[in-house]
Amino acid sequence: MLCSAKAQAVKSGNVSKVTIIHRDTDAPGQLADIRTLIAQGVNAIIINPSGPDALNPAIAEAIAAGITVIAVDAAVTAPGAYNLSNDQEQYAYLGATWLFKAMGGKGAVVYMRGIAGHPADTDRDTGFQRALKENPGITIASTAVTKWDPVTATQQINDIMSAGTKFDGIWTSGVDSNIVDALRAANHPYVPIVGADNAGFVTQLLKEPELKGAAVTNPASIGGAGVTLALQILGGKKPADSTVHVTPELWSNEDDAGKGKLTAAADATLPPTWPLGLTIQDWTTYSKPDLIACKGPGDA
C-alpha cells in the first residue's frame, strides 16, 4: 500500500512530497498521527483507519483546515471524508460462496478472521455470514481471530488440528500460504481453502497438485488509487459518492479462467505476503518496476 502510494505520487507528476507515518498503533496513535500531519500543513491525508468512527475528531479537524481526507482499505464515518476500498463485504461473500460450493454444500469450516472491530473485518464478516445463511448445510468448526498475523494464524490452525477438530474447508482473511504450509507440515489432508491474491498463496494454488483453492483479490495498490483520488478532488473533480468501491475478483485453480488469472498474476520473486493486485485499472498508472522500487517524490 505504501509503495503504491509513493509510485503513483511520482507518476502523477503533481506531488512534491509524500510524508509516510507507518507504525503498529491504535486509534489514539492514529489520532495523534493525523494531528501531526495537520500541523505540517499537508494538502491531503490518506489513512488506513483502525476503526469506523474513532478517528472522526481528528478527521473533522483536518477537513476544517481545508485538508482532503481519504480512508483506504476500510471506511470511516466522518462527514466530509472520502472512502476508497476494495468491496470487503463482497470479498468475503465471493470467497465463502465458492468455498461452500467446493465443500459440496455441507460440512464444517474453519473461519479465520482479521482484527475484531476493524471496519474491513466487520464488512467481511457481513459477507461471510450472508453466504453462510444461504448454505444451511455448512457449520463453523472453529473461529479464529488472526489479527492478520501469519505467526498467530499458524499457531491457531496448529491448535485446531492438535485438538482433533474436524473440518472440511478453511476461509482465511488473507493469512493463507502459512495455513497451507501448516497443513502440509502436519501431514493433514488438504481441504478447500480461500485466501487473498498474495504471492505465496497464488504460487501454491498453481504448484500444489492436491490443493483446491481460490484467491480473492484485495489490491494493496489501493494506496496508489488513494493518491489519484486525492489529486482529483484537489483539482476540483469530486466523485459523485463519498464512498468508492473497487470490485474484487475470485481466481480459482479449479477452472481454466481462474488458472489463467492466477498464472498471469503469479510472481515467485515477490515476498509471499505481497498482494498481486499490483495495479488498479483507471486508478494507477505506474509500472511494476516503479512499485517494487518503492520510491516517492524526491527519494534517492
Image (cartoon, helix red, strand yellow):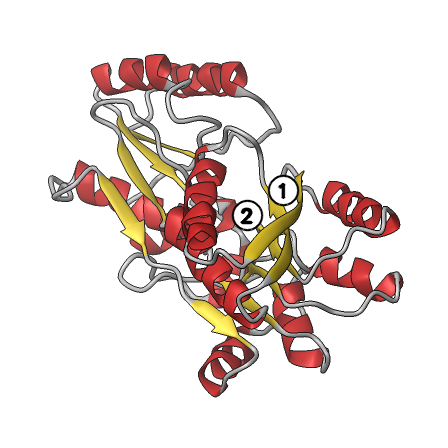
Question: In the drawing, does residue 120 fall left or right of residue 71?
Answer: right
Determine whether 130 is above or below 196 in the image: above
For residue 186, which quarter of the picture?
bottom right
For the point 34% across and 29% down, which residue is it? 76
Where is residue 78? Give x, y as percent: 28, 22
Closer to the camera in the image, 236 or 133: 133
For this view, does 38 lie left or right of residue 173?
left
x, y percentage for residue 105? 53, 66
Left or right: residue 69 versus residue 153 is left
> Do the CB atoms of the residues marked 2 and 1 lie less than 8 Å apart?
no
Against 132, residue 203 (above or below) is: below
Tell me the element at label 2. Answer: loop
Query: Which image quadrant for residue 142?
Result: top right
Q: Which mark, by number, is residue 148?
A: 1
Residue extending farthest to the bottom is 256
For the residues marked 2 and 1, what is the alpha-carbon distance in whole angstroms?
Answer: 32 Å
Q: For mark 2, what is the residue?
A: 300
Looking at the image, which residue sits at the far front? Answer: 137
Q: Report whether residue 125 is seen.
A: yes
**Amino acid at dot 2:** Ala
Q: Which mark is residue 172?
A: none
Query: Which residue type does callout 1 highlight?
Result: Trp
